[in-house]
Every structure is written in C-alpha cells, then in structure tokens.
Amino acid sequence: MERVVFKIKDNKKIAKNVFEIKLEGNTDAITKSGQFVNIQLDGLYLRRPISVCDYSKNSLTLVYKVVGKGTEQLSKMEKGDLDVLVGLGNGYDTEISGKEPVLIGGGVGVPPLFNLCKKLLAEGKKPSVILGFNTKDEIFYEEEFKKLGVNVYVTTVNGEYGIKGFVIDALKNINYTYFYTCGPEPMLKAVYNSTTTSGQFSFEERMGCGFGACMGCTCKTKYGNKRICKDGPVLVKEEIIW
Amino acid sequence: MVDTKVILSGWELDNPVIPASGTFGFGKEFADLYDINILGTFSFKGTTLNERFGNSTPRIAECTAGMINSVGLQNPGVEHVVKYELPEMKKYFHKKVIANVSGFSIDEYKQTCEILDKQDNIGIIEVNISCPNVHNGGMAFGTDPKNAAEVTKAVKSVTTKPVYIKLSPNVTDIVAIAKSCEDAGADGLSLINTILGMRIDLNKKKPVVANKMGGFSGPAIFPVALRMVYQVYEAVNIPIIGMGGVSTSDDVIEMMIAGATAVQVGAANLVNPFACKEIIEGLENSMNKYGIKSLKEIIGGAHNG
C-alpha cells in the first residue's frame, strides 16, 4: 500500500448514476486486478473505497456509482488532486483460471473485471464476459470489453437489452473452466448456487481503514475470520460461508 | 533541540505519541509502511481471555469529523496473542508495548492480566473497563465506581507491571470513577474511550451499524476528551494517558497542558495510516511555535495559577 496524490484528468457520467474517473499518478503499489483504492474527500472523515477498473504505469481508471454523500461529491469534481491509498486488498488470482474462464459482473461489480480481463488475455487465456444490469440505461463497458476481443453477454432484468434475466441465465449457456465474479451479494449467491465449477468472488463491506487495522469489515469464512479489506475482497468459492 | 521524552510510571518514552488500542492492530500493518520504532510505544488490540469474533457487520459508520465503530473486541484470545503476536511483534518493534485487556467478569480480567504480566515486551497493562460495544461487561465495569475499583484491585493482586485503567466517558461523573480506581491501586489512567453514538441510514430507515449503537471517535470528540482529562487531573495524583480525537501535534500539546503525561492517537490512524509519524515529526515544530523546550514541563500546565 502507498499513499499517492493523483491528479484528476477526466470525470464523466457513463451510465445512470455511474461515473468514470481517470486519474494521473503513481500506480506501482497495485499488484493485482481486483484490488481497490481508498479516497479521501474534503469534509468527509472516512475514506471511500473504490475498486480499480484499469491502470497502467501512471494512470488509474475508476468506475463508481453515486450511492451517497462521498460518491456524489466525487462525481462533481472536475479537476484537482485526490489523496488516495493505493494497492489495497488481495485481488484476483489469475494462475488457477484454466484456459477459458468466465467473468461475471453485476452493476458496479463490473469495473474490477475489466483489468482482470486484460490480464487473462495477456496470459494467453480466452475469457468470456457476462455483464448484468437491471435496465438498459445502467449498461456500461459493453463496448470496452468487446474491443478487447472477448465474447460479451449482456443481461437486463427487464429484457430491454441483451439476454432477459440475470447473469446466471447467461451463464448456463456457456462453457467455462473457472469463474471470477463481482457484484451485489444476492447475485454472488446466485452464481455460487448455479455452478459446480470453482471460482473467486469479490465482496463488499463497510470499511473503517481499508488496510487491515480496525477489524471493521471482518467476515467468517471456512478458513477463519477474514478482513474483507486486507484478506479480501476476493474470497475463493470453497471458503465462503453465506 | 527540544526534549520530547516523557515518563509513564518509571518507563521513559522517546515521545508521548502512542497509537490507541483497536486502531493499530498488533502494529504489523503500519510497520509495513514506516519504521514504527519512532513511536513512544503503542497499545495493542484489546485482548480477552477467549477468542472473540465481535459484532455482526456493518460495524462502521461515517460521522461529521469522526466515525462510529462497533467492532466488539474481535481478537484471537490471550493465548494466541502470547504465543504468536507478541513474539512476532519483537521482529518489527523493539520497545515495550501497552497490553490492552478487556473482560466479561472480574475473574476473566484477572486471568488475562496475569498471563500478560509475565511477558517481557509489555511495559504497561491497560485495563479497558469502558468498551461500549459489548454486552454483559466492558463498559458495565467502567460506569460504576465500586465495580471499577473491584476490577482494579483484582488485576493489581495478580500483576507486577504498572496497571492503567481505561475509563469510559459515558458516565455522569468521570472524576468519581477515576478517584475510585486510584484508591484501589491503579498506577495510572487512560481516558477517554469512545462516546456511545448512533447513525441511521435514511434510505433503509434503520441504524447504520448492525449493533445499532457504537463508539464515536475522531476529532469531533476532542473537546470532550480534553475537558475530562482536565477534570481528572485535578482530582488524582497518578499519570494520565489522554486520548480522544487527537489528530495533530498541536492536539498532543493541548492534551498534555490539560494534564496528560502521554497521548494516544486512535481514529486518525485509520484515515491516515501515517498520522502518528506525521504527529511525531510535527512535535518539534509545534514545541518551537509555542516556546516549549521540554514536554515534561507542560504536563498539567493549564492548572497552574
């Protein structure tokens, strides 16, 4: 983990209540896809954790949904500096994915899968992607994933775009060796119950510090108590207790 | 050259800055970021006789200039701490530490303290009788002068190291409890623990934290903590470790002038993992700014004349 001051380069709305912010600064502390950053915002006490969507040597892309005071404030920032803790969490392990993993994202669970998809491709694997949303106006990153050259399946609950239903309705029709998923807990649970394949889940929890000091986000697993911020946010299927 | 050294019950610290229990784990997460040997010392994660998972999540809520936590004393239990954490700690922290202890009965406090008293890298035992996040204990001992004295006496009877009692601000008269602990043999006092607080999620129309209430900490509580340190200093003759919302080197000096011999930093570590490092580095500057040559000389200065 490092504390880095990032410069805001761009911050724009890309779907209903969803924004993409591009930052410039040192990303050396990021070691894996699926890690997150923790952002300090003026006038708010606790930092706001947001998963890393994509990064390169000197740039960082985050995609976040406006859900409260912090994210609303962030969405209004056009320029300036951000005090960010970088390189938090364990991230996804790509080594055990097999040849054709599937990436399953729901809503703002989609972003961390983007860099993961690039990593898997770079490792010579053939990932496919399922993106689940409630409605058409919530959809984002379909094109970005397609540009990577992977098969993308979009689902909407009301069926106004792509496959009607949930991510698991798309999942049952494709072949895969392993899965990576991130999204709201009911979706994670549905994925868990709909497959016999092994995989990795990224969880969310209210955090105090984000780096393992306060024990604010601990959950029980079959492998013992784990801090979502430090020992997670990614847990393997075999250890999860719902 | 300024003198930042202070003495707690015969133990000389390089400076008065001490990360508070529950905000610093066993130091490992911070040792990865900077050399934590610059600290005066630190107070490790509240330890109980048996392992505890703590409360359900969510355990954290945002507040204006502060936060609420309802962790509920999650810890691996004293045997694990003695067998694994303390030996591990010696690798990255070469000073003695403060052992923070909680319990659910007098006997539990006694047993846990007796075990920790035998550990060579513990300098002070800090007995938490003020955790607002656990039922049947914790704060119950800290809100009644008689109970507070009983815990103090019991712990003193099985220990040789200095015993500091950590007091709750959630009382009508903290001075009465402080005096009661002093009379029962406490070597020092730590104050304040968090203030019982609450937030409600307006969308869900339910409390934010699963345990409904939790301990409120952060800069917002600094004036309350400072006032209590000031009041207790007037009433007792044992050293006080002052804490509650301390976030800057100026806060440290203010707390010491109110009566604290050393100062703990809590919530600030969670929003800025380098908080204690920055506070220590800022001490000399603050001392020069206010014409202070030695920190020892300012303790309780607000009470003179």
Image (cartoon, helix red, strand yellow):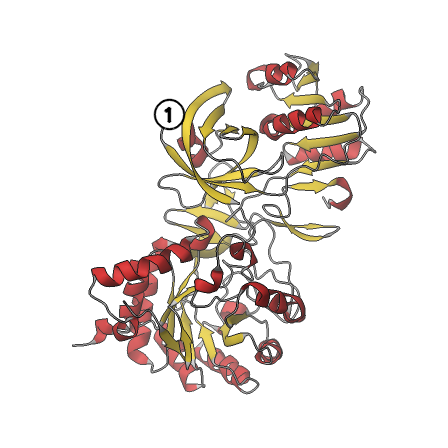
Q: Quadrant of the image for the N terminus of chain B? A: bottom left
Q: Nearer the viewer, residue A117 or A74?
A: A117
Most distant residue in the left direction: B305
Q: Amino acid at mark 1?
A: Glu
Most distant residue in the front direction: B1
Which structural element holds mark 1?
Answer: loop
Q: Is residue B188 left or right of residue B292?
A: right
> Residue at horizontal 41%, vertical 82%?
B10
Instruction: Name the residue carrying label 1.
Output: A78
Q: Is residue A107 left or right of residue B300?
A: right
Q: Is residue B145 left or right of residue B92?
A: left
Q: Position of residue B210 (x, y in %)?
A: 56, 50
Q: Position of residue A241 (x, y in %)?
A: 73, 46
Determine if residue B261 is in view.
yes
Determine if residue B173 is in view.
no
Q: Position of residue A136 (x, y in %)?
A: 59, 15
> Residue at horizontal 78%, vertical 34%?
A193
Q: Is residue B146 left or right of residue B74?
A: left
Q: Is residue B35 above or below residue B152?
A: above
The chain ID associated with circle 1 is A
Q: Quadrant of the image for the C terminus of chain B? A: bottom left
Q: Is residue B152 above or below residue A191?
A: below
> Residue at horizontal 41%, vertical 58%?
B276
10 Å crowding of disc 1: few (<14), some (14-19), many (20+):
few
Which quadrant of the view contains residue B157?
bottom right
Q: Position of residue B109 (x, y in %)?
A: 58, 76
Which quadrant of the view contains residue A84?
top left
Total labels drawn? 1
Which quadrant of the view contains residue A163?
top right
Q: Is residue B131 above or below residue B211?
A: below
